[in-house]
Image (cartoon, rainbow, N blue to C red):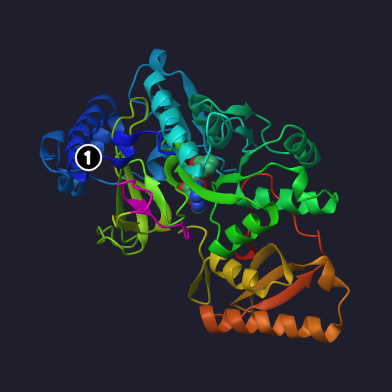
Amino acid sequence: MIWNEQAECGSVRDRRAMQLERLQWSVRHAYEHCAPYRAKMIAAGVSPDDVRTLKDIEKLPFTTKQDLRDNYPYGMFAVDMEKVVRIQGTSGTTGKLTLVGYTERDLDNWAECMARTSASAGLTPKSIVQISYGYGLFTGGLGMHGGAEKMGCTVIPISAGNTERQIMLMRDLGVEALACTPSYAMHLAEMIEKMGLDRSEFRLKYGVLGAEPCSEAFRREIERRLGICVTDIYGLCELTGPGVAYECAEQQGMHINEDLFYPEIIDPETGRVLPEGETGEIVFTSLQKEAFPVIRYRTRDLTSLTSEPCACGRTTRRMSKVLGRSDDMIIVRGVNVFPTQIETILMEMGEIAPVYMLVVDRKSNMDTLEVQIEVSQKLFGDTVKHIEELVNHIGERIRTRLGVSATVTLVEPGSLPRSEGKAKRVTDRRKI
Ligand code: DLL
């Protein structure tokens, strides 16, 4: 189902004209009401009057996480506090929190984005939705909540945690859609199997799963184990939260809510704007945000854009699944490795549980990479010879595909930590 024909399926020409008008408003709004934006534009020798075409956006300076940190907590707000009705923040646990604000209209726009997202994932006003994203400063819970309620779904705001109770409610209430991170969905699937419950006792059909990178193979495994269709959703609190982009049933990348967010892909090293189709860092400019406008915000997320038509009928540009954050990328002896690349290899093996941890260390000035993988219960009782073969095979695939050698360690089922929110896939001991 399409929630907003005009915004999602309208003509591209009309959309570009609307984007330009909104971009001009947004840049002026930031310049006039937010001192750090004004200072940066003046230093770069540009003013809002210089934005005459969409391409002129490239004249504007980038905004980084550091700018947000330097102006913590209210320095980047562009309206009086009496207009700010909500504060949310990042899920990050290190360093200063990133806090953002919303006006009433910002919240309406956010709920609109999430209603589009929910409709695109298959939800209808009849759906019962279990929201297992965390509620609180993290935008997952309240973001999904606003959109699902706006579309008229029955919402269960259970938040993350207490997995057994989640499963009982899911079964007893006939939940049709689950909203949480992919890693938590996988954990729920494992627990359902462990509790000896049968899938036929559940009415689950859809998963609205995002907030962390997830390989295509990991998605398929969740779909198989829970018997659902999984759509990916993307966002970050700096821009609003979830709902910046969302997949449709075609599962061919995420449609960007282009009436509200203007995307660009840049080379993370040089800052040069890259042509469509190339992979780089996605940068967003908000087009209507009042309380917390963002101009060319560097997300650090690596992806690519396409404007190829999509079979669903939406005409918005799509971003591919996020490969990872440039700061999640580990560099092992000069080779760039993303957890999702290792995940793809592991998932192909079939015999291991989809739970793993990459441990990077430095011994005698050499980087080492250890891939710890949980074996499945079935394999746990298997012959030593078979297990050795499996270990060699995984190591070989990592070496040939990624060009880096790794020690593969199989660990007992259930021994690696499970996450109720975003999974931690890397332990980098070099930084300790
Ligand atoms: O994670 C917002 C969100 C909540 C998105 C629920 C989707 C679902 P932050 O806590 O600010 O906001 O973290 C934002 O998470 O820059 C990406 O690195 C990562 N991320 C978010 N969605 C995806 C996704 C929320 N679908 C950071 N795939 C972003 C990969 C994602 N990474």
- Label 1 CA crowd tier, 10 Å (few <14, some 14–19, many 20+): some
Q: Quadrant of the C terminus?
A: bottom right
- Residue 355, picture quadrant: bottom right
- Residue 353, picture quadrant: bottom right
In the picture of the structure, the residue carrying the numbered disc 1 is: 15
Residue 371 in the image: x percent, y percent? 67, 71
Residue 317 falls inside the magenta stretch = yes
- Which residue is depicted at the point 51% across and 30% down? 88
Identify residue type, mark 1. Arg
In this picture, which residue range is highlighted in magenta? Answer: 310-324
Residue 189 in the image: x percent, y percent? 73, 52
Q: Residue furthest top?
A: 82
- The one nearer the camera, 376 or 417, is 376
Vertical relation: 105 (above or below) 120: above
Q: Quadrant of the N terminus?
A: top left
- Which residue is depicted at the point 56% across and 35% down? 138
